[in-house]
Every structure is written in structure tokens, then in C-alpha cells.
Amino acid sequence: MKSRFTDKIFVFLCLFAVLVVIAMLAAVLGNITYHGWDRLSWEFISASPTHGMTEGGIFPAIYGTVLLVLLMAIFVVPLGVCVAIYFSEYADRSSRLYRWTRAAVDNLAGVPSIVFGLFGLGFFVQFVGGGVDQVFFGGNLTFRQPAILWASLTMAVLTLPVVIISVEETLRAVPQSFRDASYALGATKSQTIFRVVLPNAMSGVLTGGILAVSRGAGEVAPILFVGAAYFLPHLPTKLNDQFMQLGYHVFVLSTQSPDVEATKPLLYSTVFVLLALTFLLNLVAVAIRARLRVTAGSGR
Amino acid sequence: MGAPLLSAMSANTTALPTVETSVARRRAWDWAIEKFIYLSSLVAIAIIVLIFLFVGREALPVLTSPQVHEEVTLSTMFLPQNYGTPEAPLPYVWQPVGLHPKYSVMPLLLGSLKATLIAMLFATPLALLAAIYTTEFAPRRMREVIKPVIEMLAGIPSVVLGFFALIVLATVLQDLFDLEYRLNAINAGIALGLAVIPIVYTICEDALTAVPRSYRNASLALGASPWQTAWKVVLPSALPGVFAGIVLGFGRAVGETMIVLMASGNAAITSWNFAEPVRTLSASIAAELGEVVFGSPHYHVLFFLGVLLFVITFAFNWVGTIAVARLRKRLTGADR
């Protein structure tokens, strides 16, 4: 009897832990939704900040964020797909190249985001940007400065493991019989991969891209020194322009605003927009993945 | 990259000159694409090497440049100095801006350690117990809800958690525990814990799920209760995985930037009092690099902090990966 009783207590303790975690999640989401909803309007989303950022909207920050993640996706998705194809289709699992590449991707996923920021500054801005200026612009300062191009490249490096893991998982889920059938029809390996395996893994490419975009939209530390700006009167139009970004906007408004109480309602709405953006993207990715599981299950 | 290749390939196959040339061409394409894919895997390796090289390159003057050594050396960074008076000695001071800049890394290391320690003390029990509940006790329906909901925490951008800690959590904690400072190590640590929970939870949950069903059946057949089975059979078998979860969570917490930057108060104080503000390695880089003079000793020291952070997280990830591999070996009896 006694052991039954202690049993119940421990199980309850575990359940309690689950409830605490969920309650904290609910507190964060609830608090931000509750306070962020008030000031949310079409004007807030479509207008520029005015009156020293205490009024107006956040359109430039949304625009900058979207531009940043789109550029990032253009860089990261093709590379991520190629590495995933290597892992799933080409790699000899006992080879040194496989183990090194795997270790590199694992470690890349663990590098702190601020270190990516340092890397972006030291490599992309100073080294690559400096090199481009030397070669194409006769040493005039054009690309050796923080810019949206360098920020998106930095972000692409950071999100690379996200794309690789997602794509690889779906590539592996494509049944071997598909490949065998393709080979039996006389297709070469590359034809099999690009016309049979990859089209059947498109949902993974899509989820990988979306997860990367969601992650990239929420990260701030990597772009602190490679292109994010506090306030810009114009939208970025060139690759070497600076840009405003939602997360950076939140950071600046909440830590460097002269009057936090005055900006608070606006700040809450900005956080809400950022959260909604990243969460919606995540939900879409989860939905696609769930559908994939269903179709993969019925195929067997 | 795929599309032009594909169109080029279909162009080849529609205009077949002879069977031999078409086969040769297809072979050539196949060879070229294979090499291209191999090359892309090399890019992945190159990136991690480049990160180390280029962050290291800007940090190197801290070790080699005489100009930088006029302001800072390794010994002034790590060993106690005489910054105070004999009555009130100040052995470790981080004060990079001023007439006589002081670059002692110790307050920052201690700050990172304090915030991370709180985060782990807060996150580990919750994440582990939640993982045990999910795999061992929850009905199947409930399991399918709990897992994605807890993993939603991972989808919250760290700047949002930082904002929440700065605006809401700090006030709640100050009122609750009657703290002197609003922003302190406890506040930053708990917010950091929220970011770490999904990591520890996911890895622990994976490890517990990987324990074979037969272990549980054997234990239950011997008369053990479900809790005894979970605590004395399943958990010990999954221990390397649990350890990996904690280690990887620790690595993430040490490197996390925006949360501590916003919620910790950012004062470089050398004390073990957890209710005082702290300044971490990551937050120092984030806060100072934007205003630093390019190429100054301070600039190089900040990159040196980056290398330090990189090496610390690298070591933690390495240990974590080894632990996961060991778990796999233990449960399946095979290398991967």
C-alpha cells in the first residue's frame, strides 16, 4: 500500500512539472497577446515610426525582416539541400568525409549566435567586403560596411543545420523502392536523385526553408554588427544598404528608449507581431510535416 | 541550382544524336553532379573552419601585438590585479572604457556561470520530470499534445523571452522575493531556463523513448510499480542521453545572448550573490562591439571573448555528442 502511495506522488510530481512548463509558456504568450493586441492596427503594420519611435508603425522593420530572411533563404536552401543529398544519397558512412561533415554540421548547430555575429563582421564585412571593394570599387568604401547582404549571409550560415536536418530526414523517408525502380528504368544516379527522390522530398525542402526563415526572423545577436540599424528614413533598396529588423527594434526600444513607459504599448505590439510571424511559420512547418507523416504512413 | 541542371539534362535527352554520345554525356553529368554534391559537403566543413579562423584572427593580437599589450595581456585578463586600494582591494575589474581601461575577464566568466547555473537548476528538473511523464505515464493522446506544446517554447525568439524577462518577470520576481535589484542573475537565469527547457526536454524524451519496451516489461513482470520501473530501470538506461541533454542545454545557455543582455542588469560585479546584476561574456560582446574603435585593444579583446565562448560551447557540444553516441551503443549494442 505504501509503495502505491509514493508511486502516485511521484507520478503527480512529473505531471506537475509538465503543467509548470506549459503554464510558463502560456504566461509568456498570454501576456504578450493580451498587451500586444491593443495597439495593433493596419496603420501600425503599414506606417513608419514617428515622434522618436513613440508613435507610428513598424513597417520598415517588417520590411527589413522579410527582405533579410528571403535573401537568407536564397543562400541557405540550395546549399542545405546539397549537403542533405550528400548525407542521404552519396555519403559512405564509414568515410572520413562523412564523419567530418557530420561533425561540422553538429557543431555549427551549437555555435552561439553572437559568435556568428563576430564571424559575420570579421569574415563577410571585413574580409569579403574589403576584398570586393579592393577589386571592384578601387578601394572605395562600398561593401566593407554592415549591410543587408552580409547580414543575410551570416544568417544563412546560422540556419544551415536547420535546413540540412529537415531535408535529410525527408530524403531518407523516400522509399528505397522508388530509387530501385528509377535505376531499373536506366536512369543514372543524379537523374534518380533530381527527378525521383528530391521531388518526393519537396515537403522537407519546404519545411526546412520555413523553419530556417522562422529561426532567422527571430534571431538578433548575429546581425547586431553586420547591418541592423536603429532607425532609417528609407527602406533598403541596394544589397549594401543597412536595414531595420523586428527583433532588433524590440531590443533597442526596450533597452535604449528614453521613456520606456511611453513606448511600452508600441513595444508590446511589436513583440506580438514578431511572435506571430515566427509562430505562424513554425505552425505551417509542423502542418506540412504532419501531412508528410500521414502520406508516408499510407504509402506503406 | 537544381532547375538549370534539370533543364539542361532534359535538353540532352530530347535531342539524342546517337546512343553512345548520349550515354557518355549522361555519365559526364552524373560525374559532375556527384563532384558538385561532394564539394557542397566540403563547404559545410569550410564554414566551421572559417568561423574559427576569422574570429581567431581578430582575437590573435591579444596574444601577439605589443600595441595591444600596453593595455592588456593574458595575465591582466585572468590573474588578480591591484586596481583598488590596500583597504578595499579590487583584484578583478572589467572596465574597458576610460582613461585606464581594465580588462579582467573573471567577472564576465563568473557572470556567465551564475546565469547559466540558475538556468540549469531551474530547467533540468522540470524538463527531466516532464520528459519522464511524457514517455512513461501520459496516455498516448496526451503525449501527442504535450510534446509539441513544450517544443513550442523553442520557437519563441530569444529577444522575446528577453523582453518578457525585462518587462514582466523582473517585476514579479522583485515583488515576490523582495530583491534589491530588479535585473539580476536570478531573473536572467529563469528566462534563460525557459530557452533551455525545450532542449533538455527533447533530448531526454528521445533518450527515454529509445529504451526498449522489453526493459519495462521485464521490470513490471518482476512486480515493480510503474514509478519504480521509470526511476530505477528506464532512467538509468537512458542516463547518457539525459546527461547529453543537460550538457547541450548548458552549452546553449552559456552562448545565449539577447536574454542575458536584456534581463541581467549587465553590471560586471565579482560576487557570488545571485540577487545582484551580472554581466556575461556574450552580453559584453553584444553591448560593446557596436561602439568600439575598430582595431583597438578593446576590439580585439571582444573577439577574444568570442573565441573563449566558441571554445567553451564547442567543448560542451563535444561531450554531449559523445554521450549520445554512448547511449546509442548501450541500447542497440552497435556503433552508428
Image: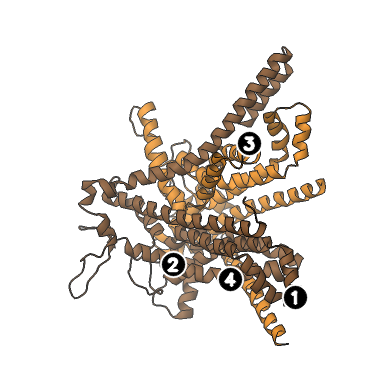
Chain colours: A orange, B brown
For residue B222, which numbered disc appears in the image?
1
**Which residue in the protein does label 4 denote?**
B126
The Cα atoms of the two marked residues, 2 and 4, are separated by 17 Å
**Does residue A55 appear in this view?**
no
**Viewer-side label of 1, 2:** 1
Residue at far left of view:
B86
User: Which element is circle 3 on?
Assistant: helix
Q: Position of residue B33 (x, y in %)?
A: 61, 28
Asked if badge 4 and badge 3 are on a common chain, one would say no
Q: Nearer the viewer, residue B159 or B154?
A: B154
Disc 2 crowd, CA 10 A, few/some/many (<14, 14-19, 20+): many
**Which residue in the protein does label 3 denote?**
A90
Disc 3 crowd, CA 10 A, few/some/many (<14, 14-19, 20+): some
Residue plotted at (37% across, 63% down): B109
**Viewer-side label of 2, 3:** 3
The Cα atoms of the two marked residues, 2 and 3, are separated by 43 Å
Please name the amino acid that badge 1 sits on: Leu
**Viewer-side label of 4, 3:** 3
**Which residue in the protein does label 2 denote?**
B115
